[in-house]
Amino acid sequence: MRQGRPHMTLSDPSAMAPSFHPPGVVPPGAVSHASVGSSSAVPAAPAPYVRRREDALLCAPSRRNQPHLHPDKINGALWFGIDPEVHAFIRATWQGNYWGSWASWNFVPPEKKDQWWHAFIQHYYWDDQFHDEIYLKWMKQTQVTVCCRISQNRRDNRQPSYMSDAHWATMVEKYSTEQAKRKSAKAERSRKSAPVGKKMHKHGAGPRCFLNIAYNMASLDEPPSYTALARKTHTGKDGSFVDERTEELMLEVEEAVEEMLQDGSPLGDSQTDSTAGSNAKRHLLNQEYIKRGKIKKGTIYGLGSVQYKNSSPSVPIHVSLQRNLDVDMRMSGFETTISEFKEEITGVKEDFSALKAEIYAFKTKVTGGMSASQATLNTILQTLQSHAFTPASTAQPSQPQALSQPQGQPQAPIQSQHQPQAQAQSTAPPQHLTINNPSELDRWCQELGM
């Protein structure tokens, strides 16, 4: 999909069926015949074949099995500048299908660019939200590699293997003219130019991409600050700066941030209150670097390809960096707040567990005391019942001695008429004791020693 044209997928019904518009409304791309006396609107022309083929490739289910592209490299995804295999595939694609005497990207025919882009679509998968950014990075990487490879081969007078003899002869002849030589000399002076009083920009990163260096410097999912990246990429093996402008800019930013944190300015206080210490300082360093490192072209000096990460084609670089930094600062504040809330929740859980333990201990103690009291009361009642029924059930009525019985003769047993009743009472089950006189209860308690 080309930059600037709307994205359309086959899942959208409007992409396949003709659109309907009310009378008098002219759809985009249509030609109105109102000027010739007609009140009807001409429907929009169908999408060209290249456009429909591109949409079909983007919606192909097989793409989900291809390597994924993501700026944050989630779940092992790949990204431009960090993973060399992406650039290697781009270079192999255009070198394997060049077939022309094209000295740069501007001379490549549109149909050939579409073929290279469609090959890239079939080899990788990405979410729709990154489509415009990925197309922009793919186009820029293809443009850079084409220009660099062709220019290097032309300077060395070495014919590349992907170009035929006829095409190479045509290119050499074209760039041997005086006009082409003057243009090349002007471009060389522009590349080596520097601001007044300063030297040409240099870095010590070598052939490595700044994005790859920043990714390797990241620790615990925290990217390095812009000043740390500038120090890493613009110093030699002995630690000295190879670019004086980067050194001046970095020292100026670090000094401003230190004064901001020491003086307790509102900006420094708000940042340190909302984020952790090191994270807050990194945000302040990046913010000051963006503010002080902006150049006339709208880019940030000394950041290289890092500044193009998560950038939008329609938004300036410094605006996109500031917006991403604000989002990162808010997310860091949310993470700190969530961590503090989790700690508070953990403390509340511990207090609640201790309270439950205390309630359980108190309940056990109360239950044990009530059980002991109930057992004591049952013992008292059983003792009282045994003392109350024992005299009444075992006592025998006293028999009067017979006065008329002569001495010396055995006394015949006298059977009382109340004896069967006494025996019946002794064998009857004990009944519950009902005490109507409180004095009797006191007497029994004294006898039991209570």
Image (spheres, helix red, strand yellow):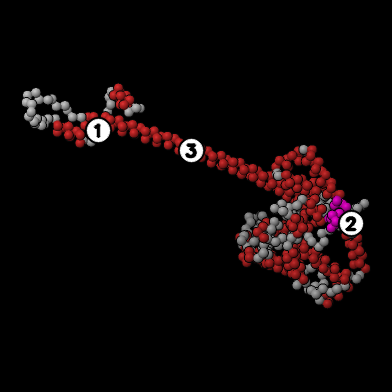
Q: Position of residue 334 (x, y in %)?
A: 66, 45
- Mark pair 2, 3: CA separation: 79 Å
> What residue is drawn where x is 83% and y is 77%?
165
Q: Earlier in the sequence, mark 3 or mark 1?
A: 3
In the image, what residue type sits under mark 1?
Answer: Gln
- Mark pair 2, 1: CA separation: 118 Å
Task: Give the magenta range.
Answer: 234-247
In the image, what residue type sits under mark 2?
Answer: Met
SS label for mark 1: loop
| Neighbours of disc 2 within 10 Å: few (<14), some (14-19), many (20+) | few
The numbered mark at residue 200 is 2
Q: Position of residue 261 (x, y in %)?
A: 78, 41
Q: Quadrant of the N terminus?
A: bottom right
The numbered mark at residue 284 is none
Q: Is residue 5 visible?
A: no
**In this figure, which residue is indicated by the disc labeled 1?**
431
> What residue is drawn where x is 73% and y is 65%?
85
Q: Nearer the viewer, residue 396 or 205?
A: 396
SS label for mark 2: loop
